[in-house]
Amino acid sequence: MANDKPQLTFWQIWNMCFGFLGLQFGFALQNANMSRIFQTLGAEMDAIPILWIAGPVTGLLVQPIIGHFSDKTWTGLGRRRPYFLYGAIFTSLALVLMPNASYLWMAAGLLWILDASINVSMEPFRAFVADNMPKNQQAKGYSMQSFFIGIGAVVASMLPWVLAHFGVENHAAEGHIPDTVKYSFYAGAVVLLSAICWTVFSTKEYSPEELASFSDSNVTDGDQKLTVSAQSFLRNGLGWLATGLLSTFLVFDNQWDKQLYVLTISIAFFGLLQLIVSMRRKGDSKITGFDSIFEDLFTMPTTMKQLAVVQFFSWFALFAMWIYTTATVTSVHFGSSDPSSVAYNDGANWVGVLFAAYNGFAALAAILIPYMVKAIGLRKTHFINLLLGAIGLALFLVIKDPDYLIISMIGIGFAWASILSLPYAMLAGSLPANKMGTYMGIFNFFIVIPQLLAASVLGLLLRLGFDNQPLYALLIGAISLVISGLFALRVTKEVNE
């Protein structure tokens, strides 16, 4: 029987999770301000979702690759920490450049760089907790991450509003980004790099040999036999590729919304990758590199498959909120859709305050969630928190005074804290230690796939069914959170829950 990992002290967990404060500082600046930047640089309402495509696409490509290689890495700096540090350096550079974009295509391109860099740092952080903490402390570790995510996002989201109150110019000429946004991104670069460095240089990691001594699953890639045949990949790949190509042709032939190309081409590309795997196999019974990711994707543990559905609907809702809250609040609650108007910029700043509020409530929720888990278990706690989030999004339809929108942020904050912690706590116990990074990367497929879907179809849904009114994207998000909560109740119950 393998030994369990030693219990960590409060301050060891604190140092290990502190880097998330910086990561979320950068992530929150992006979430609260990218739609504003896009609209300022001339983006039309129905084009905004497709401009956000950088996040899900880079996540889909970067996260499993980084997860796989971080499993195999061991340097003088450790296993996961080199990825934290190098990702943070590039993220900070992207944050400095973003508010200086003078053209829409520049902002969209910089978002690709920003998202890719954040993903290089963020993905190994999830595995970092599972690597270093015993199972009975993992929920606490992920909740501590949620706490720092909340604190970082509160400050970052409010920063343009705070700077405006201290006299920094919040209004700029048409096509120019206000100084409040520029200085917020500069501050974000400093905070992100500093927080990541704190974690990198104040924590240690277990060596691969030490991890093996703690794990009951000491199988290495070289010893693991293939369970998905080359023929299966060939059949599946041909099916996905044919579906994607046919769908792409239908979009072209019927002149449907161009955003659907993102979805159809992604389907075809997934099929093509499976065909490549089938050709690379050629009867080899060993798993290596690229093949390993696809092997693990199709042989996920049962708990991971169940949680994938929960994550899908949760993150579809979140992406709808991030894309359309600015457009909703500025047009509905502040009465302006003109990015050069004072009312629009006041409304956009207020969105920053609202996002700060839900992250602040998330930080508080992160303190309460371990007690909820102890009382009623992981699944029921997650269900309740997702339901609170759905109520919060639905309140946008009935609250008219923007000041009272703070109330809706309470429920959203609880949902956000829960989404960032409890699925990972439910998942970590079902994964082998030697593949933690790879599986965490694959798990994030079910964060980025719903974002791809949202970027592809939300604009079309609003235009065809809701007269292009962004408010109803939040209603769609509320329904999605309810569905997610119901699926959370179906996740296999852990023995220690």
Image (spheres, grey):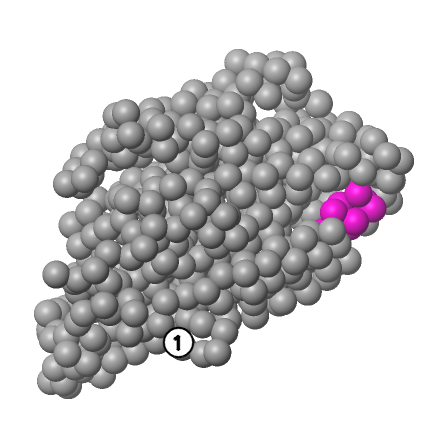
* Residue in view at x 17 percent, y 72 percent: 219
Look at mark 1 in the image and give the residue it sits on. Answer: 73
In the rendered image, residue 424, in percent from the top left (x then y), is placed at 33, 47
In the depicted structure, whether residue 117 falls above or below residue 21: below
Q: Is residue 332 left or right of residue 247?
A: right
Q: In this view, does 72 lie to the left or right of 200?
A: left
In the rendered image, residue 272, in percent from the top left (x then y), is placed at 29, 71
* Residue in view at x 40 percent, y 46 percent: 141
Residue 497 lies in the magenta-colored region: no
Residue 184 lies in the magenta-colored region: yes
Q: Main secondary structure of the magenta part?
A: helix
In the depicted structure, whether residue 345 falls above or below residue 138: above
Callout 1 secondary element: loop
Query: What range is drawn magenta here?
Result: 177-185
* Residue in view at x 57 percent, y 48 percent: 21
In the depicted structure, whether residue 286 falls above or below residue 349: below
- Amino acid residing under circle 1: Thr
In the rendered image, residue 91, in percent from the top left (x then y), is placed at 61, 62
